[in-house]
Image (cartoon, grey):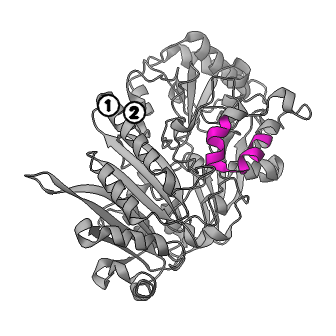
Amino acid sequence: MMLPNPSIFSLFLFLLLSSATWAHPKASTLDSFSQCLSDNTEILIPFSKAFITPNNSTFLPTLQSTAQNLRYLTPSVPKPEFIFTPLLDSHVQAAVICAKELGIHLRVRSGGHDYEALSYVSQTETPFIIVDLAKLRSVNIDIEDNSAWVQAGASIGEVYYRIAEKSKTHGYPAGLCTSLGVGGHITGGAYGTMMRKYGLGADNVMDARIVNASGRIHNRESMGEDLFWAIRGGGGASFGVILWWKIKLVPVPSTVTVFSVVKTLEQGATKLLHRYQQVAATELDEDLFIRVIIQPTVIDAKSGNKTIMTIYQAQFLGGVDRLLDVMGTSFPELGLTRKDCTQTSWLKSVMYIAGYPSNTPPKVLLQGKSTFKNYFKAKSDFVKDPIPESALEGIWKRLYEQASPLMIFNPYGGMMSKISESEIPFPHRKGVLFKIQYLTTWQNGTEDEADHMDWIRKLYNYMAPYVTMFPRQAYVNYRDLDLGVNKKSNTSFIEASAWGNRYFKDNFNKLIKIKTKVDPDNFFRHEQSIPPLPLPLRKSSTTAR
């Protein structure tokens, strides 16, 4: 801890009192917190620029800036007392020290993609504040070392751009959505189009810097291997605040091929999707990733008649000639032709999968802006045996009931089957054919919410016989509060098992033990954070390192 600097503290008070834009939602909380910060870090900026309060004109734009799910931006949803936007690692460190010292509940946001908004909304504990890492977004590439140090506030698209800026034959196997914040993305696993070749983003992390519950900054060596294991796939905001990841860059070819092939029910989509399930994970080359996007579409505007559209969207790490050979051998049923394919660079292939038009300049990735903002609810499943055609037809009937539902099948296999379930907390490995994401979106806020929530829950119940069981697995980065939530500051590890076993399987028990060791007081907590063991069950008294 640094001793307060009198001259800096005086400057801080002057700026605090003289700033015309300053507002006091709760003077005691804000004053106490800001004074504590000045005591625990050197103030390198006017804090009127680092604090954003509800009475400030930039409060709502800042709160909404990276938030994806509009369900959590409605007036009735709790808002933070203020948003703190640190510029330095030491500011984050001081924020943790002060929040703990003053008993202030905090949420930490890197990219705002949490499906249930846990990084910027607290529905179990109020008041709360947000530490927004949006200004901590450095990306330092070291091609010779095949690595990069990346700050938590950077988007994964920025990382991709900076890698490609240095090399056309290096990449990183992480998310498909380019506006994901690196800090939270990797804590949940971070899957992407190269997962069948190289595994997850979290499988390719070499080091990290984290602020723990005592306000100390640790790297891999000083935090220890248990904590380093936990933060790579154990879910965000349970063990500390990620400041930096050191990621391992992987080789990519200079030519990458992409394609999208659409098949409707009239074109045999049901039989084709059944065949896809049999080959996508087990028979296709690990250089090839084919996901299937499934949604209803109107085929006759007058009658309103619909069909089901399945879009086979792919990235292949190689040229079109070899791709056609692979498809001709392993999945000829799709009928892929040369004209379906586009050869491009790895970076442009990432943008293609993310949905950018082909003429979009790559520099758009540096903006870190989401291309998806909706009112939505999502759920997830993992599949180990092909879903029969009769069950697929049952899915189609249910998709017809909604205006804009979506299902996505993401293939596993390849490297994902070779990595042990316990290598990192992310357990969905050998035997998984594909992951399903269910999504329903709407535009009228709370007016339509109940109908959509009811629909997706019924679809989820319908799918129960066809997906993993005991536990029915789920992906932690597709956060789903339907699976259960922690109670306010009284987290039961038994109750938390309802969702913890689904996200982490047997790894959940190890995560609880590590949580108990590094954060026994449960300072880092949210609706689905990892709980510590209750005092009577702890073998011995532990303190955070």
**Amino acid of disc 2:** Arg
Is 278 on the left or on the right of 293, as rendered?
right
Q: Position of residue 471 (x, y in %)?
A: 62, 49
Res 71 label: 2
Provide the residue designation for mark 1.
Answer: 445
Question: Which segment did they paint magenta?
Answer: 496-513
Rendered-image quadrant of the N terminus: top right
- Residue 539 vertical position relative to residue 371 in the rendered view, above or below: above
Q: What distance separates the C-alpha of mark 1 from that of mark 2?
A: 7 Å
Is 514 on the left or on the right of 269, as rendered?
right
- Residue 118 vertical position relative to residue 510 in the rendered view, above or below: above
Q: Residue at the location (66% across, 62% down)?
A: 203
Q: Position of residue 502 (x, y in %)?
A: 61, 47
Secondary structure beneath label 1: loop
Task: Say whether marks 1 and 2 touch (CB < 8 Å).
Answer: yes
Rendered-image quadrant of the C terminus: top right
Where, by quadrant of the figure, is residue 294 drawn? bottom left
Q: Residue at the location (66% across, 49% down)?
A: 504
Q: Position of residue 447 (x, y in %)?
A: 29, 28
Where, by quadrant of the figure, is residue 328 drawn? bottom left
